Image: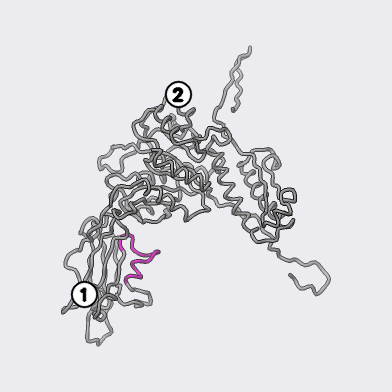
Amino acid sequence: MATLTRPGVYVDLSSFPTYAAASPGTANACFVGAAPRGPLTPTFVTSWKNFTQYYGGFETAYPPSALHLAVFSYFSAGGTTAVIIRAYRTDASGPTISSFTFNDQSTTQPQPALQVFADNPGSWGNNIYVDIYPGTVLPPVGSADPTPLTFTLVVKYQGTGQANIVEHWQNVSMVPGSTNAGVNNYAPDVINSNFTGSNFITVKDLAVLNSTPTPAPHNNPAKTTASQQLMNGADGSALTLNDMVTAVQQLDLYPDQPFVLNLPTISDPTTLGPVISYAQQRGNVFVVVDCPPGISPTTMVSTAQSLGASPQVAVYYPQVQISDPYSPVAGRTRMIPPGGFVVGQYIATDASRGVAKAPAGLGTSLLGASGLETTLTNDQQGILTQGNVNCIIAVPGTGIVIWGARTLSPYLVTRYVPVERTIIYLSTQLVALSKFAVFEPNDWVLWNQISSVLSQFLTAFWQSGGLSGQTATDAFYITCDGSVNTPMSIQQGIVNVSVGVALQYPAEFVVINIGQWAGGQTVSVAAA
């Protein structure tokens, strides 16, 4: 508070909470599936190139990886960031890590000095090769021992030639705390760094296990005469239902973050049932379901109905044709599930139009898609739509587009994807904007503060087209006063806030009425 020393007007800054704008993105994409390589914890990626740094490119993922194909199509369709969860066998038959141990430079009794591991489990690590060379940092002039104080570690992948070199770690040391030109160069610190470290290996200093350690610098690993291959990595047994569910539940690390979730190629109710239940229990996860290959529209409807009637699930059909990234032969194509493309359009539409806009229509051209497994007739589209399966069709002059925006819910209020996702978005934002109220005095001052903050947010959302109504009063209401906060609820530490919103519904059917009059024709268009 300002010190009042003279008559006049004083300005005092208040800690009254103000509206904090929502983040640009309304949800994060998440893909869960098996992969031959990659971290075992959820990892954010921002591009296809960034994804390949962690999980390898198509040259690593062979036989073809459904996860790779989904993420590739996601970024092709306009996706921006995604959380990747590598599912793996969690019991004793799970994947193992490749490794190799280098001895030190002792000429009398060499001892284990440096153990090199693949960065994560899987047989992919058996394709890593390592060379050790003397470093260029020499001891002080006049030293009795001219042995270089450092060593250089070279990582090669899928071969031992110069073209296979993927990383150089120059002038690193086996002395903890050592520096080179003022920069830490202790090998485990440098190579294992979470920020600037290796994308292929981690290392372990074994000197601490030696009863009579070799003195520096001879404790550095000895020079190799040939590239040493990491060994004994394995992919483990096939995934079980429990493994997939456990992988999805790693989203618990981000309890307040909404997600659009896809399990590439997974469409069976046995696996998706627990995943859908998890999404409903969290309340802020929307599941995009792939269609199986080679099934008819009627079979697809039956498959979708077997998944239940959740408003947090949307199914898409048919599979999409792309240029085959696994084939060296030009012109080869591959059919893939549509989930990656669809999730990419969800995120791109959120960014360009907002969550209230259905991710469907002529603006959802799937870049990179060259064809469809099935060309749907109007009757087939009708069967799929009435079965709450979203069609993907080819539109001349536009390309391959999403032509449906329905959830699996049979109820009108939650039938549409943008309606359900708007509910998820608003719930998430209103909770985040109200957290300032926790532990504040529970009286009319706090109630007014809550009403003001939420009103600012909802007004902005309505003005952006997110809510229906010609005025803000038509679009939403907020009640946070003595009518909903009784003396009893106040004594229990509860603040009650009642919020109502008028949601936007997509124009799914456009009806054109044509009538004739003497001078020609008149056309009126009405959305139903």
Q: Nearer the viewer, residue 143 or 22?
A: 22
Secondary element type, mark 1:
loop
Point out the stretch of residues depicted in magenta: 187-201
Q: Where is residue 263 in the image (x, y as percent from the top left)?
A: 40, 44
Secondary element type, mark 2:
helix
Quarter in which the C terminus is drawn: top right
In the displayed structure, 236 sits above or below 522; it is below
Q: Name which of mark 2 and mark 1 comes first in the sequence.
A: 1
In the displayed structure, 181 sits above or below 226; it is below
Q: Is the magenta stretch mostly helix, strand or loop?
A: loop
Side of 453 where 104 appears, left or right: left
Residue 192 lies in the magenta stretch: yes
Disc 2: which residue: 378
Residue 262 sits in quarter = top left
What residue is shown at x 28% (from left), y 63% (from top)? 117
Q: Position of residue 241 (x, y in %)?
A: 37, 45
Number of numbered tags placed on the structure image: 2
Disc 1: which residue: 111
